[in-house]
C-alpha cells in the first residue's frame, strides 16, 4: 500500500503510540541492552518515514520496525567500535547479534513484553526504581510524566531510571520470564506495577486530562497476558478490578471532562461486557480461596456494578468486604473508603465519626480525597459551613483539573446554600 | 558471567554443630557446582581476629592489626562462581548456608580484557 506523505506520517505516529513498546521489548532481547534498543528503535521509526514514502507501508509494519531496528542496532555498535578501538567487545557484540537466529513470531513478541515487565520488576531492583522503570520502558511514559506522578524532580527521576538500567546491565539481570517456582514471589511486584499503570491511565498525573485510555488498556492487556501465564487468583482479581473500573469509563466524565461521581453516573452507559467478564473473574478468584487485596477490591467493585442505582447498592456487603480487606491490608485509605461505605449504610454522622478519627491520626491530612469525603459527609449532615471549609482544604491539595473543577462546583453550591440560610434566619 | 558471593554474619552465636553442618552443606554445594563447571573458587575464612590491613600512603606501607572496618557482621567466606545470569547466582546464594543466619551479598565481577 502506497499512501500520501500525510497518511504515512499519521500511520507512523499511530504505530509509535501503539506499538513502540512492543518493538522496544523485542529489540531489548535481540540487542541485549536497553539504551541501545531505545536508540535503534528511534532510528527504525525515523527510517520508516523515509523508506515507506518511497516503497509504501509494509504488510507487517511491526515486524519491519523490529527487523530494521535490529540492523540499526548493529550499525550503532559498529559505528561505536570504529570510534573506539579500545572496546573490541563492541564489534564482537555486533557480530554476535548479526549471526544470531531470531524469533519474530507473534507469540515471541508477546512474550518479550512479559520479559520486559518481569525484568523491570526484578526484586534485585529497588522498588522505588521498579515502578518508574516499568512505566518508562514497558509503557513508554515520559520521564517528566513519571516524575510528576511520584512528586519528584524530572532529573531525580531520570537518575533513578538510569540506575535501574545500569543494574540490569551490570548485574546481568536476565531478560526472562521467571521459572515456575520463582513465579509466585515475582508476581506480587508485577501486579502492583500493573495496577499503578492502570491508574496512571484511569486518573492520569497530567493536569487536565483525566483519562488516558491506552494506558489502562495496556495494563489490562498485560494482566491478561499474566493470567494466561499463571491462572493465579490475584491476577484474576486484579484483571477483574481493572475491567470493572474500565466498564464505567464512559459514565465517569462528562463530554467536557468533568467528573461524574459513582452515585450520579448514568448506569446505562456502563459497559455490560466488561462487567460480565469482571464478575466471572471475581467469582473464580473468590472461589479459589487464595484471593488477596485485588480480588477483594474487585468484589467491592462488582457489588457496585450489580446495583441498579446508588441507593439500591448492597452497602452492608460493601462494608463487610472493606472489613475483610482491612484485615489483610491495614491501610488508612482503605479505612477511609470503609468509612464512606458505613456512611452510605448508616447515615453521614456515623461516617463522619470514623473519618474524623482517621484524620486525627494525621496520615491522611495531605490526602485531598479524605477532605473531599469529609466535606461530602458534612454537606449531607447539613453542616454547610464546615463542609465548605473541608472542600477548600481538598481544593488546596488536589492536582487534577477535573477534580479541582468538581471541588469548586461543590464550594459554589455550598456558598449559595449558606447565603440562603443567612437570608432565612 | 562471574559473581562473587560474600557471606557476612556474626562470628559468635554459632554452636559447634551448626558450624559443622554449615561447612558440610557448603562443601556439598561446592561439589555440585564443581560438577557443573560453575565453581571457580570457594573458601571459608579464618576469624576476623586474624586479619591484617595494609594501606600504602606516600609510598609507605602502614600495617595494622584488624579488618578494614569494625562491623557487627563480618566477612566469613566466599564463593566465586561462573553462571549465566543474576537469577542463577541468586539461586546459588539461596542454597548457600550462611544466607540463613547472616547475609550473602552477590557482586558481579567487573570484566577486564586480558585478565581471563
Image (cartoon, coloured by chain):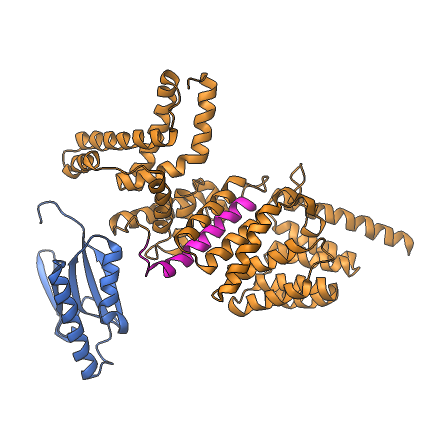
Chain colours: A orange, B blue
What's drawn in magenta, residue-wise?
A178-202
Q: Is residue B67 visible?
A: yes
Q: Is residue A204 visible?
A: no
* In front of the other: A30 or A104: A104
Residue furthest to the bottom in view is B16
Left or right of A330 in this view: B105: left
Residue furthest to the right in view is A424
Identity of the residue drawn at 29% across and 42% down: A29
Left or right of A276 in this view: A263: right
Residue A242 rendering spot, x and y as whole percentages? 54, 50
Residue A145 rendering spot, x and y as whole percentages? 48, 42
Query: Is A21 included in the stretch rendered in magenta?
Result: no
Q: Residue A206 appears in which quarter of the rendering? A: top right
Residue A318 rendering spot, x and y as whole percentages? 64, 63
Above-or-below relation of B94 to A98: below
* In front of the other: B70 or A191: A191
Query: Is A199 included in the stretch rendered in magenta?
Result: yes
- The number of discs equals 0
Identity of the residue drawn at 13% across and 59% down: B36
Magenta region, main secondary structure: helix
Above-or-below relation of A75 to A239: above
Identity of the residue drawn at 73% across and 66% down: A346
Above-or-below relation of A344 to B72: above
Residue A340 rendering spot, x and y as whole percentages? 67, 61
Identity of the residue drawn at 53% across and 63% down: A286
Amino acid at each position: 500500500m502506497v499512501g500520501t506523505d500525510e497518511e504515512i506520517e499519521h500511520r507512523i505516529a499511530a504505530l509509535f503510540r501503539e506499538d513502540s513498546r512492543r518493538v522496544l521489548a523485542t529489540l531489548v532481547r535481540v540487542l541485549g541492552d536497553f539504551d541501545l534498543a531505545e536508540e535503534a528503535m528511534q532510528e527504525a521509526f525515523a527510517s520508516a518515514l523515509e523508506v515507506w514514502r518511497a516503497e509504501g507501508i509494509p504488510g507487517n509494519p511491526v515486524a519491519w520496525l523490529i527487523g530494521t531496528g535490529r540492523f540499526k542496532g548493529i550499525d550503532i555498535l559498529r559505528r561505536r567500535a570504529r570510534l573506539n578501538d579500545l572496546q573490541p567487545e563492541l564489534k564482537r557484540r555486533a557480530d554476535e547479534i548479526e549471526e544470531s537466529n531470531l524469533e519474530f513470531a507473534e507469540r515471541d513478541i508477546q512474550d518479550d513484553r512479559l520479559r520486559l515487565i518481569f525484568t523491570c520488576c526484578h526484586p534485585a531492583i529497588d522498588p522505588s526504581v521498579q515502578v518508574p522503570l516499568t512505566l518508562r520502558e514497558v509503557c513508554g511514559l515520559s520521564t517528566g510524566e513519571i516524575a510528576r506522578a511520584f512528586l519528584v524532580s524530572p532529573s531525580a527521576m531520570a537518575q533513578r531510571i538510569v540506575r535501574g538500567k545500569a543494574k540490569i546491565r551490570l548485574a546481568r539481570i536476565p531478560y526472562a520470564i521467571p521459572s515456575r517456582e520463582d513465579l509466585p514471589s515475582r508476581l506480587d511486584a508485577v501486579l502492583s506495577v500493573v495496577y499503578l499503570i492502570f491508574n496512571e491511565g484511569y486518573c492520569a498525573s497530567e493536569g487536565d486530562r483525566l483519562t488516558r485510555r491506552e494506558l489502562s488498556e495496556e495494563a489490562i492487556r498485560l494482566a491478561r497476558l499474566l493470567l494466561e501465564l499463571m491462572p493465579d487468583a490475584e491476577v484474576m482479581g486484579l484483571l477483574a478490578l481493572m475491567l470493572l473500573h474500565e466498564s464505567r469509563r464512559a459514565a465517569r466524565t462528562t463530554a467536557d471532562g468533568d467528573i461524574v461521581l459513582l452515585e450520579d453516573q448514568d448506569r446505562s452507559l456502563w459497559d455490560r461486557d466488561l462487567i460480565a467478564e469482571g464478575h466471572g473473574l471475581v467469582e473464580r478468584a473468590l472461589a479459589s480461596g487464595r484471593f488477596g487485596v485485588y480480588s477483594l477490591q474487585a468484589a467491592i467493585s462488582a457489588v457496585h456494578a450489580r446495583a441498579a442505582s446508588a441507593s439500591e447498592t448492597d452497602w452492608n456487603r460493601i462494608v463487610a468486604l472493606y472489613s475483610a480487606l482491612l484485615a489483610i491490608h491495614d491501610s488508612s485509605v482503605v479505612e477511609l473508603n470503609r468509612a464512606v461505605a458505613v456512611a452510605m449504610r448508616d447515615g453521614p454522622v456515623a461516617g463522619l465519626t470514623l473519618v474524623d478519627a482517621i484524620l486525627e491520626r494525621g496520615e491522611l491530612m495531605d490526602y485531598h480525597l479524605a477532605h473531599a469525603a469529609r466535606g461530602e459527609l458534612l454537606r449531607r449532615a447539613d453542616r454547610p459551613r464546615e463542609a465548605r471549609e473541608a472542600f477548600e482544604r481538598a481544593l488546596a491539595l488536589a492536582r487534577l483539573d477535573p477534580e479541582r473543577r468538581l471541588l469548586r462546583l461543590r464550594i459554589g453550591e455550598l456558598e449559595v446554600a449558606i447565603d440562603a440560610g443567612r437570608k432565612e434566619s | 558471567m562471574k559473581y562473587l558471593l560474600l557471606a557476612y554474619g556474626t562470628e559468635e552465636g554459632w554452636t559447634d554443630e551448626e558450624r559443622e553442618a554449615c561447612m558440610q552443606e557448603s562443601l556439598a554445594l561446592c561439589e555440585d557446582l564443581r560438577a557443573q563447571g560453575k565453581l571457580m573458587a570457594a573458601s571459608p575464612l579464618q576469624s576476623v581476629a586474624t586479619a591484617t590491613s595494609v594501606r600504602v600512603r606516600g609510598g609507605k606501607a602502614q600495617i595494622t592489626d584488624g579488618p578494614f572496618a569494625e562491623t557487627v557482621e563480618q566477612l566469613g567466606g566466599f564463593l566465586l562462581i561462573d553462571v549465566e545470569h543474576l537469577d542463577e547466582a541468586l539461586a546459588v546464594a539461596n542454597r548457600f548456608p550462611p544466607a540463613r543466619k547472616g547475609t550473602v551479598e552477590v557482586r558481579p565481577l567487573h570484566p577486564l580484557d586480558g585478565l581471563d
